[in-house]
Amino acid sequence: TGPSLLNPVGMPLADHLDGISDWQAYVHFPGTQPDGEFYIHLDSELQGMAIDLPAPLFKSAVDRMPLAIDFRFPQAGITEWEVNVAEQMSAVMRFAVNDGAMQIQGANLQIGGSTASAPVRPGLVIGGETDQLSVDDWLSVDYGPDQEGGPEQILTAVDLTVTDLRLMGQHVSNAELSLQQDTAAWQADISSETISGSAIIPFDLYGDEPVVLELERLAIDDEEIDGGDDRLDPKLVPS
């Protein structure tokens, strides 16, 4: 189940996984080879488990999403998870182990078939390329305990190329998106044919702090705003 997989390592996404799937496991012993290593391997098709997260992670319970995890132990007190999802996403997550408790130190996630490297900074760093991404949907996901908090609880930085990007109610094609976590806001940079510039996006979108935009280029998607009328109603454009 989702909780049995994620709760022991303190990752606040277990509530978005529902169902039960079959797993296979084996343990690799180094034997007499000097360069051998001990590790534990798990894999599953995840059939029977639904993932209620935005694309590219969303899946229904009936869909297959091959997942393989290798648990490695590079040094005393450290555990690394090497994860491969459907040969389209890979991740390396590093945990400190102390008195049986695991605390995540850092994680790298690569989307689009590239192989993730070991993390060198705290939090989750995402890179690569994907066909579809809705920043609005991901910002609305609850990440913290008891469904409190936002992506800043685990996410540190994003550097993605996206074919179909949804951002602040707008549809953007072939975008290069960079997101960096600051003290109380996200520092965002975007480059595409329709929008180019930077933004400061507060963690609390419904708080007192505004979203600050500094754009070099902006072509508003009027079909998204007014339902496809030939003429854009200025009253419907965000101020």
Image (spheres, rainbow, N blue to C red):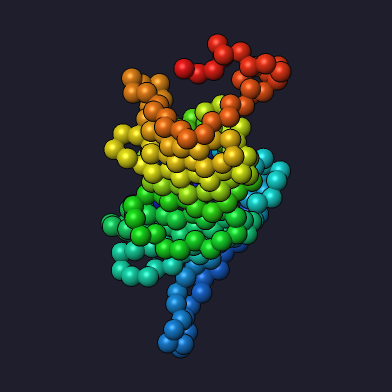
Q: Position of residue 204 (x, y in %)?
A: 38, 27
For the residue pair 28 and 118, the one nearer the viewer reads as 118
For the residue pair 129 and 102, the one nearer the viewer reads as 129
45 over 73 or under it: above or below: above
Q: Residue at x 37, y 70 (%)?
A: 74
Q: How many marks?
A: 0
Q: Residue furthest top?
A: 235
Q: Residue at x 44, y 84 (%)?
A: 35
78 displayed left or right of 220: left
Q: Residue at x 58, y 35 (%)?
A: 194
The image quarter containing residue 57 is: top right
179 over 120 or under it: above or below: above
Q: Residue at x 49, y 41 (%)?
A: 190
Decide if residue 82 is in sight here. Answer: yes
Q: Position of residue 136 (x, y in %)?
A: 52, 31
Q: Position of residue 226 (x, y in %)?
A: 64, 17
Q: Position of residue 17 (x, y in %)?
A: 55, 40
Decide if residue 69 is in sight here. Answer: no
For the residue pair 202 and 148, the one nearer the viewer reads as 202
